[in-house]
Image: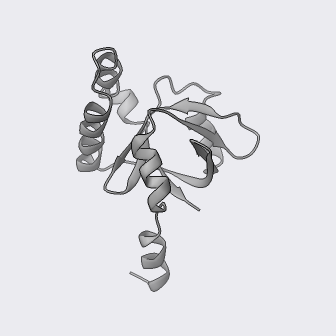
Amino acid sequence: MSPIRKAQRRRGFTRPVLAALVDAPMIGLRAGREHRFTGVWVVVVGKRAFVRSWNDKATGWRRAFREEPSGEVRVGDRVVRVRARPVRGPRILEAIERAYAAKYDTKASQKWVRGFRVARRRATTTEFVPR
């Protein structure tokens, strides 16, 4: 692996932002600068932030990030510039599902946590990395 790739790989969210992502029940996402902020559930696995789309509408945040991977995450009072990446590995996808179940553990949340395990929603898993 080249030194540039190693440096990019090690760069992650700052500790305060990571802590805010862990604690936040919901964050705002915006693709590019034109798309509106949309509220989504976020989980952190191994210092990495992940989200899943419930509907995956043509006008939704996931498709907007597919067109333009750069955008912003709003967590609390912070707005952090990010880049979106699709997630495919079965081990990380399973870890993300466990993280959703652990973080969103209320009775009212269980319907949504189970729904995120459906293949079409699992396929929308997106990682956000700071840029």
Seen at 42% across and 78% down, the residue is 6
Q: Residue furthest right?
A: 34
Task: Say if 108 sits above or below 25 in the image.
Answer: above
Seen at 63% across and 38% down, the residue is 64
Q: How is the image coloured?
A: one colour
Between 58 and 96, the one lying in front of the other is 96
Between 16 and 50, the one lying in front of the other is 16
Image quadrant occupied by the N terminus:
bottom left
Seen at 39% across and 54% down, the residue is 48
Q: Quarter of the image holding residue 112?
A: top left
x and y percent of residue 120 in the render? 38, 28
Task: Say if 18 sits above or below 124 in the image.
Answer: below
Does residue 126 appear in the picture of this structure? Answer: no
Between 96 and 27, the one lying in front of the other is 27
Image quadrant occupied by the C terminus:
bottom right
Between 107 and 50, the one lying in front of the other is 107
Task: Say if 64 sits above or below 20 in the image.
Answer: above
Does residue 91 appear in the picture of this structure? Answer: yes
